[in-house]
Image (cartoon, rainbow, N blue to C red):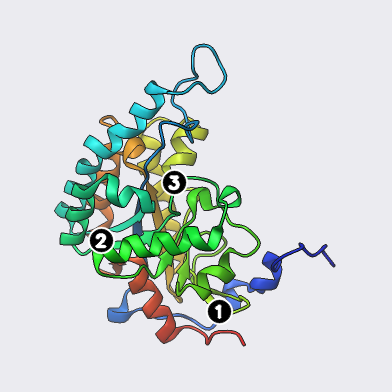
Amino acid sequence: MNFPKPSVGMLPTDRVAYSPIVNRKPLKLPKKARMVVWTIVNLEEWDPTQTMPRTVITPPAGGAPMPDIPNWCWHEYGNRVAFWRFLKIYDDFKIPGVMNINGVAIDAFPEIVKACVERNWEFVGHGYTQRNMQKVENEREDIRKCSEVMLKATGKKPRGWLGPGLTETWETPDILSEEGYDYVADWVLDDQPVWLKTRHKPIVSIPYTQECNDVAMMLIQHHKASEYYERAMDQFEQIYKDSKDSARVMALSVHPYIMGAPHRAKYFRKIFEKIRKKKDVLFWNGSQILDWYLKVGPKAPE
């Protein structure tokens, strides 16, 4: 089918070819492992002078009043309190952390950044501010500023990118590649890493998740807290079976203000109480997955 071309950039079907997972050359992990689990903590700063990106309660008078104190505080609780619950879970189970963070949040929450740097968490670009990338005035400048503040704070330039709300423009993969990024997690379409073409050099897409994601599960679908554990275990068990002959990657996505809430945190912990016992399951960050794929996966497309 011939789809109409956008005025700028490639179509998704131009960037990644259709590839049935059952027809690919098997991917093998070290130490006879079957699959990889990576967990991503999304940390954001919400601007109180703007409409809140999400709401837990509808403003009484309707509309989008500012300041929206109830909803701003709902989110801010995650950074003040709930994140530290997450940190204890990560410490207790020795899980390599991935911090998907806004550039402005680097300065807003220095104690969180310090704690993650001390534990050698990987920092992933998440937009300079928490807004749809299609609404950013200058996308390249936004991506560049995000990289610069992370380099200054952590001593390392981020290798991975995950856009706010998974949003992209027609040019996002091109700009990411040109700005030195090695992988992107916005493209939730596979259980293995895949190459994406860009106008510069190809970039790797690493599997992320919309299903085991607390935003979708708790805020959109309105499930009870235990659903996160139940769905994660069902997801894990199926991917574990699928990975018998070729490795797979499973992602878990959480936000401190959602899954770190007092009535939900124990269900996040329960996941690791169970799957951390599996000797043939690796817990890696995004860069570790990338480096493995670059070594054992197919070569980049021309």
* Mark with earlier residue (2, 1): 2
Within 10 Å of disc 2 (Cα), the crowding (few <14, some 14-19, many 20+) is some
Q: Quadrant of the N terminus?
A: bottom right
Marks 3 & 1, CB-CB < 8 Å contact: no
Q: Residue at x 36, y 49 (%)?
A: 104
Q: Which residue is the site of mark 1? A: 202
Q: Which residue is the site of mark 3? A: 213
SS at circle 2? helix
**x, y percent for residue 237:** 40, 56
* Separation (CA) of disc 3 from disc 1: 27 Å
**Badge nearest the viewer, 2 or 3:** 2
Give residue 263's quadrant in the image. Answer: top left
Query: Is residue 187 at all visible to an observer of this figure?
Result: no
* Mark with earlier residue (2, 3): 2
Marks 2 & 3, CB-CB < 8 Å contact: no
* Separation (CA) of disc 2 from disc 3: 27 Å
Q: Which residue is the site of mark 2? A: 153
Q: Residue at x 18, y 48 (%)?
A: 111
The amino acid pointed to by label 2 is Ala
**x, y percent for residue 122:** 29, 64
281 or 200, which lies in front?
Answer: 200
**x, y percent for residue 33:** 32, 74
